[in-house]
Amino acid sequence: MGGRGLCALLGGGLVALFMNNPARADLHLCNKTSYVLDFALALEDKSAVATRGWFRAEPGQCRAVLQGAIEADALYVHARSLPVYGASPLAQTGHAELCVADGNFVIAAARTCRARSGQRLVRFTAIKPAQTEQGLVANFAEEADYSLDQARLAAIQRLLVLGGYDANPIDGLEGKKTDAALAQFLKEASLSAEATKRADFLSVLADWVKSAEGVGFSWCNETRHVVMAALGVEEQGAVTTRGWYRVEPGQCMKPEMIGRPERLYSFAEVLGVEGEAFKRPEKTLVWGGTKPFCTRNVRFEIGDHTDCLGRGLNATGFATVDLTGRKGVTVRFRE
């Protein structure tokens, strides 16, 4: 099969070249990771290499990318994750450098890129699909070795965590924390529980994460340290403080709350190895204000803020966060 045949296979409607056993010859790429992935495929035969992309496979999905029997010296795949995940979680090593482009593309001579056409070299990895009843299958998995169903749930957990919801750990297993975080997201996004069964739910969730800045209340930790935060919620003139919430470096968190209060209070600090506030010569890494409320050193929920010290509690200065007329507020911790 020369270059012309490869071009027909990749560009001409996925033409089947050999039909001895067409029912079991289709090539499927199965995404068993917790990331939405886009794939580019390359076929090499003798001196000819052609590439085509992109094929999106959501976690838990097997995507048919070629139909009919295939004869080639080698098959290669390049996988990329959505930009919403930040730095790519995928290894950048591979077995060949071949051309890809943005959008839908077919490149017949894929070793030499045409920069003017937006083509660029990326690393492709050789694959050897397994023969199954469904056809040829190549699996893409993480160290966690999720099943297809677990991969989809882990993907939901990962996107929820990226959006600031507390759905940790990302393990692909059902649990109360995941259920609560998912319910909080559905409420804020004005979606019904049935939305989770939609084929495009992960795309909807990913789009929400990209645009969720300033929706509801969030803490974002832009330091190199773990930050412990506490929240005060004002309801009918009374304030209840709760803590502590752990906000990892480089991550955001949306603390769960009932209703839509118009005023919140926020306090946070970095703790040193001895459990005291982390101090530098020039400053202490604490983010608070002048509104005094009671806290304690361990996990707490306090509704009475009279005589904090006399009751063996801490009197802590919180910053006021006014939500009146605002869709949301993000409090950022910076050094």
Image (cartoon, rainbow, N blue to C red):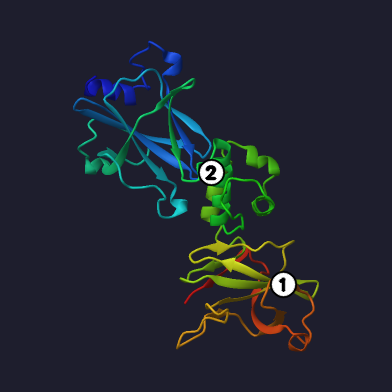
First in residue order: circle 1 vs circle 2: 2
- Amino acid on which disc 2 is placed: Ser
- Please give the name of the residue rendered at 67% of the width and 49% of the height, measured from the top-left corner: 175
Residue marked by disc 2: 203
Bin the neighbour count of mark 1 within 10 Å (Cα to Cα): few under 14, some 14-19, many 20 and up. few
Residue marked by disc 1: 300
- Please give the name of the residue rendered at 39% of the width and 28% of the height, measured from the top-left corner: 129
State whether residue 335 appears in this view. yes
In the image as oriented, which residue stretches furthest toward the front?
A: 274
Give residue 269's position: percent from left, percent from top: 57, 77
Give residue 124's position: percent from left, percent from top: 31, 39
Circle 1 — which element? strand
Residue closest to the eye, 205 or 77: 77
Distance between the alpha carbons at the discs numbered 1 and 2: 37 Å
Are dots 1 and 2 in contact, CB under 8 Å?
Answer: no
In the image as oriented, which residue stretches furthest toward the top?
A: 20
Residue 40, relative to residue 291: is it above or below? above
From the viewer's perspective, tell me whether residue 310 is left or right of residue 272.
right
State whether residue 204 appears in this view. no
Mark carried by residue 248: none
Camera-nearest label, 1 or 2: 1
